[in-house]
Image (cartoon, rainbow, N blue to C red):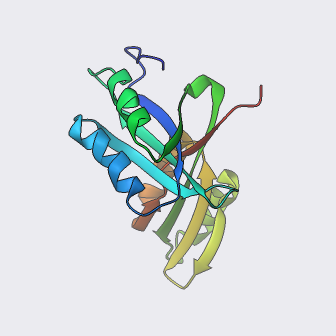
């Protein structure tokens, strides 16, 4: 496991676990008991229905991550643990957002949506629901660009990640 550098506050940990009830609670509880804040959490079955993949983004500012990784390795339902270096991984997150779209600003909003290559999922006379999948930092930028229009509702999935193929 890599230790955090002063500029690397967030670590992405991917864990393959047996797809059984209670496993997620035990794994997440381990981070909590050690005082780590889970910034982002995504979990879903893998291509093998016996296993699920949990992707955590944890705040490790001021605390080494090695101890929690050692404790994770001791859990019987954990199959594999890997920390992904942000420079050697592909990370994505999904955002769903409903934005105010009155007649006076609708054209400008639609241009912005097109520029960002976001998708319109639903719309009515006063709002447009969008989706965008991108790196977390890019979603932060997109969210900031939407704020002047008025964000009515916003949901982000948390990041998922895989090692880069390079």
Q: Which residue is outermost to the front?
A: 76
Q: Is residue 83 above or below residue 45?
A: above
Residue at the (53%, 68%) spot, across then down: 105
Residue at the (59%, 54%) spot, across then down: 51
Residue at the (37%, 14%) spot, across then down: 6
Residue at the (35%, 32%) spot, across then down: 71
Q: Nearer the viewer, residue 78 or 92?
A: 78
Q: Nearer the viewer, residue 121 or 125?
A: 121
Q: Is residue 69 left or right of residue 138?
A: left
Q: Is residue 81 above or below residue 50?
A: above
Q: Is residue 165 left or right of residue 40?
A: right
How many numbered circles are shown?
A: 0
In the picture, the quarter occupied by the C terminus is: top right
Q: Position of residue 21 (x, y in %)?
A: 42, 64
Q: Nearer the viewer, residue 49 or 129?
A: 49
Q: Is residue 138 above or below residue 3?
A: below
Q: Position of residue 79 (x, y in %)?
A: 54, 41
Q: Which residue is outermost to the right?
A: 166
Q: Position of residue 66 (x, y in %)?
A: 38, 22
Q: Is residue 136 left or right of residue 132?
A: left
Q: Which residue is outermost to the bottom?
A: 125
> In which quarter of the view is residue 24 placed?
bottom left
> In which quarter of the view is residue 75 placed?
top left
């Amino acid at each position: 496991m890599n230790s955090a550098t002063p500029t690397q506050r967030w670590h992405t940990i991917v864990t393959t676990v047996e797809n059984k009830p209670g496993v997620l609670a035990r794994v997440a509880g381990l981070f909590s008991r050690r005082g780590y804040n889970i910034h982002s959490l995504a979990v879903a079955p893998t291509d093998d229905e016996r296993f699920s993949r949990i992707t955590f983004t944890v705040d490790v500012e001021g605390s080494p991550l090695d101890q929690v990784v050692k404790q994770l390795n001791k859990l019987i339902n954990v199959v594999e643990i890997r920390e992904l270096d942000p420079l050697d991984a592909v990370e994505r997150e999904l955002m769903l957002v409903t934005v105010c779209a009155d007649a006076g600003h609708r054209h400008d909003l639609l241009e912005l949506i097109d520029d960002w290559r976001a998708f319109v999922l639903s719309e009515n006379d006063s709002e447009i629901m969008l989706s965008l999948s991108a790196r977390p930092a890019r979603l932060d930028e997109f969210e900031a660009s939407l704020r002047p229009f008025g964000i009515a509702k916003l949901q982000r999935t948390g990041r998922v990640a895989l090692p880069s193929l390079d």
